[in-house]
Amino acid sequence: MNGIDVRIDSTTNQLRVRFDQLPDKLRKRFEQTIRGLTNELLHKVQAREPVRTGLLRRQTHAYVDVNKVKNFVRGRVRVLNAHNKNVAAAFGALEYGSTGKRFPVQAYTRGRTSVRAYTRRGGIKAHRFLRGPAATMIPKARLELQRVLQEVTGDALKD
């Protein structure tokens, strides 16, 4: 494509467009398109998240990263909770599921009541609230990016 090397990398929860050179006009169009796709993905993820307290939904955010030095535009939806590793582990168990094996629970205090240590059995079914919507949006995102590339340069991405 006019001497510009274009690569789209995608996983189940992110889409990245990389260039060896990225003209400003093309970068801006990709950023707009990826921002729209990322916001759409955020809404789909939040719609599939299990809701009990609303904490999971409050911790789910969309990000669009533009790096002019490394020539990429990236859209991501992530669940962030750096403050409490137990909450982060619970989010992970909801996304990926758990094995059903027994695991120890440390003693803790609930209000003024002490709870002794005990063992608990896992067995949470994977909800795939992040990976499911992201996987279904990858083909649409590729088509949108191909359309933008064709509009700006006249060429289409080759798979």
Image: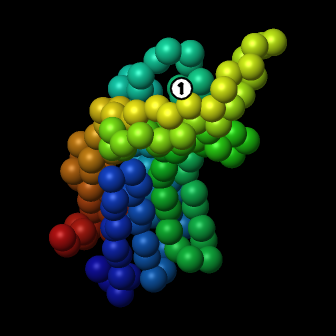
| Residue 77 visible in rendering | yes
Q: Residue at x 69, y 39 (%)?
A: 84
Q: Look at mark 1 in the image and give the residue it sits on.
A: 57
* 110 or 158: nearer the viewer: 110
Q: Position of residue 141 (x, y in %)?
A: 30, 50
Q: Is residue 71 above or below residue 133?
A: below
* 97 or 100: nearer the viewer: 100
Q: Residue at x 33, y 61 (%)?
A: 10
Q: Position of residue 66 (x, y in %)?
A: 58, 61
Could you tell me which secondary element the residue under label 1 belongs to? helix
What number of labels is visible? 1
Q: Is residue 112 above or below residue 70?
A: above
Q: Position of residue 99 (x, y in %)?
A: 33, 43
Q: How is the image coloured?
A: rainbow
> Residue 96, located in which quarter of the rendered image?
top left
Q: Position of residue 114 (x, y in %)?
A: 74, 19
Q: Residue at x 43, y 72 (%)?
A: 18
Amino acid carrying label 1: it is Arg
| Residue 25 visible in rendering | no
Q: Is residue 142 above or below residue 98?
A: below
Left or right of 55 in this view: 34: left
> Residue 95, located in which quarter of the rendered image?
top left
Q: Is residue 148 above or below residue 3?
A: above
Quarter containing the C terminus:
bottom left
* 107 or 46: nearer the viewer: 107
Left or right of 107 in this view: 1: left
Left or right of 77 in this view: 98: left
Quarter containing the N terminus:
bottom left
